[in-house]
Image (cartoon, rainbow, N blue to C red):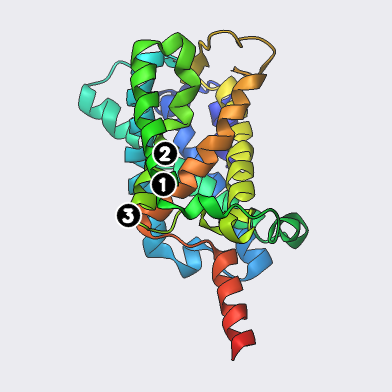
Amino acid sequence: MTGAWIVAWNRFTWFQSFQPHTFSLLWFGYIAILNALTYQRSGQCFLTHRPRFFGKLFFLSAGFWWLFEYLNQYVNNWHYLNVPTISHFEYVFYTSISFSTVLPAVVSTYEWLSTFPRLTRPFQKWHLLPWMIDQKTGWIFFGLGSMGLGLIGIWPNLFFPLLWLCPLFLILGIQCIRKEKTCFNELAQGDWRPVLLSALAALVCGFWWELWNANSLVHWEYSIPYVHTFKVFEMPILGYSGYIPFGLTCLAITEFSLDYQPSHQLKFSVLSNQDTA
């Protein structure tokens, strides 16, 4: 990761042909480090204990972020600069590799954060929200998500924040309607850890996304209505609030598509079974 950071922020002549592709190198390094840190603290990580799931997560991530690229065509909140002149196939190929790191980075950060008891224990038994598992709640979520996508298409400059909420509402709505487990199920028992950890994981990754983007050759810039002031790197400071629902969406799509169960919940289930026995 350190080597990728050096070549990403410099313009070495010998590295010129690879300069546009440093994003993936940075994030592969970050993902490996987070798995190593998680293994150090808990004795397990995705790379050692769930490699097949982890491999699938990269493929899911590529398609997942392409969805946001599609929605951005309506709001135009970000655009890319210094993209090399290549064929459409090459562009899709290289960008898909970059997009494939999004979910592994966020979920790996989630797993690492879950190894800190002082962070998670206060929220293990907090406020109960039993209505979060009601089927009627699912229809409300689905309706809000569908309506929000329509509003984005009609008034993008006004409803652009819904880009980060609508995918989450649709996933949760479908899961609740089908009476499947959602990332909000634990709220019914007062367990806020999935909400807290997924939001915090996305904010941590968001910091590194924006930091490494700042001096990279190929990078993105933002055009966000009304709040395009007080930038931290390229992102307006209020724009970082979008990472909170994005983290929940990352957790929701991973659970929905790959039947993911976080390690801290697996450990809790094992302990509960042992206590019962």
Q: CA distance from mark 3 to mark 2?
A: 14 Å
Front: mark 1 or 3: 1
State which quarter of the image contains the N terminus: top right
Q: Amino acid at mark 1?
A: Lys
For the residue labelled by badge 2, is the local secondary structure a helix, a strand or a loop? helix
Three-letter amino acid code at disc 3?
Arg
Give the quarter of the image for residue 8.
Answer: top right
Judge whether 75 appears above or below 100 on screen. Answer: above
Residue count near mark 1 (Cα–Cα under 10 Å), binned few <14, some 14–19, many ≥20: some
Closer to the chain start, of discs 3 and 2, is 2
Residue highlighted by disc 1:
136
Q: Are marks 2 and 1 in contact (CB under 8 Å)?
A: yes
**N-term mark: 1 or 3:** 1
* Residue 183 visible in the picture: no
Identify residue type, mark 2. Ile
Q: Marks 2 and 1, Cα distance to the nearest angstrom?
A: 6 Å
Element marked by disc 1: helix
> Residue 186, position in %: x, y?
56, 58
Q: Residue 133 or 119: which is nearer the viewer?
A: 133
Residue 269's disc is: none
Q: Which mark is residue 140?
A: 2
Residue where numbered disc 3 is placed: 178
Mark 3 packing: few (<14 Cα in 10 Å), some, or many (20+)?
few
In the foreground, 249 or 191: 191
Q: Image quadrant for the C terminus?
A: bottom right
Q: Nearer the viewer, residue 5 or 150?
A: 150
In the image, what residue occupies the spot 44% across and 25% down? Answer: 163
Q: Is residue 222 left or right of residue 97?
A: right
Tell me the distance, in whole angstroms, between the alpha carbons under discs 1 and 3.
11 Å
